[in-house]
Amino acid sequence: MRDSDKTGWVMLKQPNCTYCEKALDMLMDAGAQVRMLDISTNKALKDFVRFQGLDTVPQIYHQGYHVGGSDILADYLQNLAFFEALDGIEDQGEFPFA
């Protein structure tokens, strides 16, 4: 993961949440710096989650973008890795998938 992608991570979580633990493991494996916020102890955060139309945790945000839950996080991290790999490919002036 690029250094610029390692920061700006926020996870809304609750205690004893296996999906929260799974998401945190994925983020730690990717080298992300994560700010963990417990919605069970913060009414404003719990209201925020409900206002967004969400009813499960974790809810993960990266640099202000709502990623989603732990299942979507795996795809998001794969996409970050893909674009990181593209950084090393020399531009040949054509779109290689045309």
Image (tube, rainbow, N blue to C red):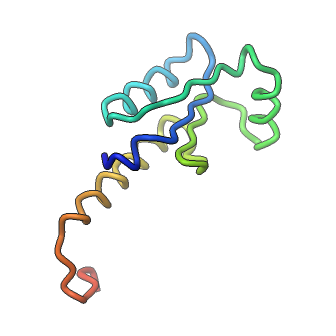
Does 13 appear above or below 82?
A: above
Number of numbered markers? 0
Q: Quadrant of residue 61?
A: top right
At x 70%, y 22%, the residue is 39
35 or 61: nearer the eye?
35
With 61 as the anchor, is 4 left or right in this view?
left
**Rendered location of residue 24, percent (x, y):** 44, 26
Does 86 appear above or below 44?
A: below
29 or 56: nearer the eye?
29
**Rendered location of residue 45, percent (x, y):** 75, 28
Does 55 appear above or below 94?
A: above
Does 83 appear above or below 65?
A: below
At x 77%, y 42%, the residue is 53
As drawn, the residue found furthest toward the top would be 16
Quadrant (top left/top right/bottom left/bottom right) for the C terminus? bottom left
**Rendered location of residue 58, percent (x, y):** 58, 29
With 55 as the anchor, is 95 left or right in this view?
left
With 62 as the anchor, is 89 left or right in this view?
left
With 38 as the anchor, is 89 left or right in this view?
left
At x 24%, y 89%, the residue is 93
62 or 51: nearer the eye?
62
At x 60%, y 12%, the residue is 15
**Rendered location of residue 47, percent (x, y):** 82, 31
